Amino acid sequence: MSLRRNPATLTAAVLAAATLASCADSQRDDGDGDGGGGSDDGTFIFGAAGAPEMFDPFYATDGETFRVTRQMFEGLVGIKPGTAEVVPELATEWTPNDDGTEWTFTLRDDVTFHDGEAFNAEAVCYNFDRMFDQNEAGQTAGEYWGYVMGAFSNDAENSLYQGCEAAGEFEAVISISGPTSGFPTMLSLESLSMQSPKALEEGDANGIAAEGEGFSFPAYADAPVGTGPFTFGEYDEANGTITLARNDDYWGDAAQTSELVFRVIPDESTRRQELEAGSINGYDLPNPVDWAGLESDGNSVEVRDPFNILYLGLNPEANPALKDLNVRKALYHALNRDQLVSTQLPEGAAVATQFMPDTVSGYNTTIEPYAYDPDEAKRLLAEAGAEDLELTFAYPTEVSRPYMPDPEKIYEALRTDLEAVGITVNVKTASWNGGYLDNVTAGKYDAYILGWTGDYDSPFNFIGTFFGNLKENDFGTEAYPWGKTLADDLRAADAVVDDAERGAAFETLNQQIMDEYLPGLPISHSPPALVVGPGVDGVVPSPLTAEEFDTVTVGGE
Amino acid sequence: MCVVVVVLSMLVFGWLRSLPGGPVSAMLGERQTPERRAALEAALGLDQPLPVQYAKFMERAVHGNFGVSTKVLPGEDALDVFLSRLPATIELSFLAMLLAIALGIPLGYIAARRQGSYVDTGAVIFSLVGVAVPVFFTAFLLKYSFAVEWNLLPVSGRQSTGVDATRVTGMFVLDGILTREWDASWDALKHLILPSVALATIPFAVIFRITRASVLDVLDEDYVRTAEAKGLTSRVIRGRHVLRNAMLPVTTTIGLQVGGLLAGAVLTESVFSFRGVGDALATAFREKDYPVLQVLILAAAVIYVLVNLLVDIAYAVIDPRIRTR
C-alpha cells in the first residue's frame, strides 16, 4: 500500500500502521484505551519542540536531536535514570592506571548493532578514531568532541584523547593526555555514542563538507545505526514526524512500546492542546503556569531535579566599578532571590549558593547564601564610593530556557531590587539569536542574565566552563588580579586523579569563588519539567533532560 | 524579472547580514566563545567581506546552488527545502483562495444587488471583521473552538500519526485521491480546514468588498440601463453585462491576494504547526538560516511577479478590448 522513502523500513512501517491506527483511535476516544494491548504493542507519541538537525549524534549540538538519538544510541558509560550518576552501559567496568591516563574498559559481550554487526573493542576504537580524525568542516561541526577533548588528530598534542587500543575482543584501552574530572563521565554524552563501524563506513560518515554558509552531511546522517532499544524507522519531514521501532534484539530489557514517535510541534500552547486532544502522549517543558492545570486535567507533570544555574553575569571590562569586590557583594545583597524564586520560578526551584547545583560532585554544602540586605548593599556601595553606580543591564527576548522560563519577568524582579538600593539601571535587550549572545560574548553589557545546563556530572563542566579559560569567558576574569590564579587552580583541581581529593579541591574552590572572587552572582536552579498524559507510565525524569523512553508504557499496560 | 530577482537578492543579502546575531549564534548557543565563533565563521565563510560573500553566493546561485540550510533542515539544499515545503503551502493557499473566491464574489454580488438590506449590512460588517482581526488571532480562535473545545477537527499538523499515506506530489489531499487512499485524503483535508479558513479571512473580506463596490459601479452604467430597456432577461444582464465587467478589478484583487498569501501563511502555518513555506520562513528567521531565508524571499518575489503576469493574461481573457489595444 505504501511506498516509503527507505525500503528497509517498509515492513516495520506496515506493521506499525495497524498499531498506530488502533492506538491513535483509542487515545482519541477515551484517553485510556489499551493502546493495542500489553507490552507487545502500543505507540508512545512525544511532542517535540523542534525537528532534529540530523541523526548522527556526533555532529549534533541541540537537545531535540539528542532526544531522538538517545533512544537509538548508547555510550560506553551511561547515566542512571533519574540521576546524573554515571553507570555502566556498553562497558561493564573501567579502570584507570595510576596516573589516570590509560583507561581500560571491559565491554559487554552480548551486544550487536542494529545492522547485525558485532559490538567489540575494535568497534569502540573505530568509533573513537573516527571522531578524532575529522576534516576541517568536521572539526567545526563536531562541536562536543572539540569541547570535551580540546582538539582533533591534526592537533593531537593538544587533544585529551590520545588513542584507543583493542587489548582483547571485549577490552578497549583509551589513552588520554592527563587526568580530568570529566573522564570517563564525558563518554555518556550523546555525541560520543557508539555507532556501527560498517554503517559509518558505508555511509561515508565523515564526509561532511562546508557548503556556502552551512554544512552538508553525508548519507549516514540520515540512516543511523546504533545499539539502543529503538531502531531508526523514518523521518517524515513533510509531516514533521520521526518514527522509531523497537529493537527486538536489544541486549537489555526490550522497549515497552513497539513504536516511538516524535511529532514536531514548535508552539508550546499547541503541544498542550494536542495533549488535551489525546493525539500526543507527552511533551517537554510545559509552561510552569500550566503545571497545576495540566495535573488537574489528569496529566502527570514530571519535575526533574535541577541541573542548571541561572546567574547574573558581570563584566568588569565594560564597567570598571565592578572590579571592586565590595560593589559586587553590594549587588548580591541587593537581590531578593527568595522572593524571585517563589514568585517567578516553578515549584522546586532553589536559591543558588554557588555556580553549580547540589547534584554535582564538588558542591560545597557549607556555603551560606548571601542574605537579602538592602542596607548592607547601600553600605558596601558607599564604602566603595559607588553610590551613583550606573549599570547597563541586559536580558534576552524570544527565548525560554530551562533555567529561565521567562527572562523578562526575572529581569524585572532583579532590576527593581538593584534600583531600590540606588543603582541606575540602563535597560538593554536583544533577541537570543539576534545579538544577545553575541553582545554578551563581546562584553557589551555591564551585567546580563544567562545560565547553563550541565552536560554531565563534572564540576569542571560548570565552573571550569565559566572561569577555566582565562582569555575567553563572559565574566571577563582576565581583568581581575586573581583571574589567572582561579583558572590555574580550576585546571589543577580537574587533574586530580582521586575522586575524593578532587571533590574536596572543587569544594574549596567553590568557597573561594563565592567569598573572595564573586565574578558573577549565582541566582537560582530551576527544575524543568515534562508532562505525560493519562495512562502513560514509566517516564523517569532526568536532571540532564536525557529521558530514555524504552521503559514507557501507554494506556496503562 | 531577472532584474527584479538580482536587485532583490542584493537587498535581501545585505539586509539579512545587517541584522544583529546570525547563524553562528544560533548554532553555538550558550557554548559560544570568541574562539569558537571565529572558527565557525571562518569555516562558513562569514568572516569575509560582504561583497565577497555576495559574489560567492551569486556564483553558486547561477549554478542552481543556493547553499545548504543551517537550521530548518541542516545539510539540505536550501532550494530543496523550499521545494519540499511548497506543496503544503500550495495546498493550503489553494483551499483558502477557493473559499475566499467562492464566498466573496457571490456575497459581494448579492450585497450590491440588495444594497442597504440586512444581508448587505451583515455581510459588510462580517468582511470588516475579517480585515480588522489579525490572522493569528482568528487562527487561535478557530483552533481553540473547533479543535480543543469541540474536538471536531485536528489541532495541528498535516496528517494524523499512524495514517499510512503514499506521498506523490506532497499535497496530501491530492496524493490520497491519486492513490485512492481515501482515509489519508480525508484525514489531510480535515487538517486543512481550520488553517485554510483562517488564511481565507482577509482575501475573502477584500474580494467581497471589491466585488460589491465594482458591481455597484457597473449597475450604474448606461449600458446596463440600456440592456434593461431592451428587455433582456435579468440572467443575461447579470452574467454578460454586470458580472463580466465587474470582474476586472476583482481579478486584479485576487492576483494581489494570491501574491500576499505567503504573509498570512507565515502566521497561519506557525499557529497550526503546518509544515509549509510560511512555517519554514518563520523558523529560518528565528534561527537565522540565511540560505533558506534567501531562497524563500526570492521565491516569494518570483511567485508574486508570476501571479501578476497571470492576472494580466486573465484580464485579456475577461476584457477583449485589452487584447486589441
Image (cartoon, rainbow, N blue to C red):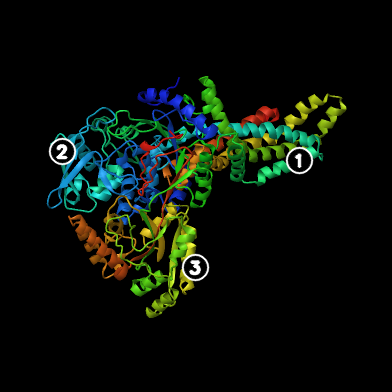
Task: Identify the image quadrant of the C terminus of chain A.
Answer: top left
Q: Position of residue A224 (x, y in %)?
A: 32, 33
Instruction: Name the residue tied to disc 1.
Output: B122
Circle 2/circle 1 CB separation < 8 Å: no
Query: Same chain, marks 3 and 1?
Result: no
Q: CA distance from mark 3 to mark 2?
A: 59 Å
| Chain at numbered mark 1 | B
User: Is residue B309 in view?
Assistant: no
Q: Residues within 10 Å of mark 2 (few under 14, many from 20)?
A: many
Instruction: Name the residue tied to disc 3.
Output: A416
Q: Position of residue B219 (x, y in %)?
A: 80, 34
- Quarter of the image for residue A234 reads top left
| Chain at numbered mark 2 | A
The kind of residue tagged 3 is Thr
Task: Identify the image quadrant of the N terminus of chain A.
Answer: top left
Callout 1: helix, strand or loop?
helix
Q: CA distance from mark 2 to mark 1?
A: 81 Å
- Quarter of the image for residue B242 reads top right
Name the mark nearer the viewer: 3 or 1: 3
